[in-house]
């Protein structure tokens, strides 16, 4: 996670912000899998594929394709995404599997969402004249995302995507 935060422009990261970033990643993964599972249930399939994740992202109203980041440049450790996805699947969705291609797609989507989330928080830090990214900066992004054009972010507190599109 620190790699993504550094790539987004954070010079320093407070301990409470690191915990919030990790929790936010888990909630993003859980939300995407939940939406994909709802779409997958209609097809009576047991394996989650990249197409289902793409449909889930579109269903949530998040424009990821316009902002995809390169996984080589900014990435969350693949083991963390796999562990979070399997934990979400084991807790809530019995018997559902996730394909290797879907893991790669999930890694790309989550990295993009996380990068944009932290990048917006870094803007608040710079505006405040600080170098350290704190948890309050991550929490204060949501009112800004609701009022700024072309900003769509995942709100881990309400479990919804905040968007300026009306």
Image (spheres, grey):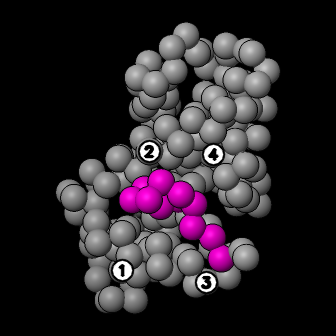
Instruction: Return the residue nearer the eye: 157 or 135.
Output: 157
Query: Viewer-nearest of labels 2 and 4?
Result: 2
- What residue would you read off at disc 2? 27
Q: Position of residue 75 (x, y in %)?
A: 52, 44
Query: Viewer-nearest of labels 1 and 4?
Result: 4
In space, the residues marked 3 and 4 are separated at their CA atoms by: 22 Å
Q: Earlier in the sequence, mark 3 or mark 2?
A: 2
For this view, does 28 lie left or right of residue 23?
right
Q: Earlier in the sequence, mark 1 or mark 4?
A: 4
Query: Viewer-nearest of labels 3 and 4?
Result: 3
In space, the residues marked 3 and 2 are separated at their CA atoms by: 23 Å
- Which residue is depicted at the point 59% across and 40% down? 32
In space, the residues marked 1 and 4 are separated at their CA atoms by: 25 Å
- What residue would you read off at disc 1? 125
Residue 109: give its label: 4
Q: Earlier in the sequence, mark 3 or mark 4?
A: 4
Query: Viewer-nearest of labels 2 and 1?
Result: 2
Q: Are marks 2 and 4 in contact (CB under 8 Å)?
A: no
Assess disc 2: are there few (<14), some (14-19) or many (≥20) residues with their C-alpha within 10 Å of its C-alpha. Answer: some
Residue 148: give its label: 3
What kind of element bears circle 4? helix
């Amino acid at each position: 996670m620190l790699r993504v935060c550094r790539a987004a422009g954070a010079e320093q990261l407070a301990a409470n912000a690191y915990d919030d970033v990790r929790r936010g990643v888990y909630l993003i993964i859980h939300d995407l899998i939940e939406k994909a599972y709802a779409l997958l249930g209609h097809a009576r399939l047991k394996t989650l594929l990249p197409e289902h994740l793409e449909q889930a992202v579109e269903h949530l109203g998040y424009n990821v394709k316009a902002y995809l980041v390169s996984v080589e440049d900014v990435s969350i450790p693949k083991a963390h995404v796999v562990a979070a996805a399997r934990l979400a699947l084991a807790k809530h969705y019995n018997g559902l599997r996730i394909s290797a291609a879907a893991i790669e797609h999930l890694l790309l989507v989550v990295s993009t969402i996380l990068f944009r989330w932290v990048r917006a928080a870094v803007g608040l830090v710079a505006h405040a004249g600080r170098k350290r990214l704190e948890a309050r900066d991550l929490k204060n992004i949501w009112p800004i995302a609701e009022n700024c054009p072309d900003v769509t972010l995942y709100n881990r507190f309400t479990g919804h995507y905040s968007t300026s599109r009306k």
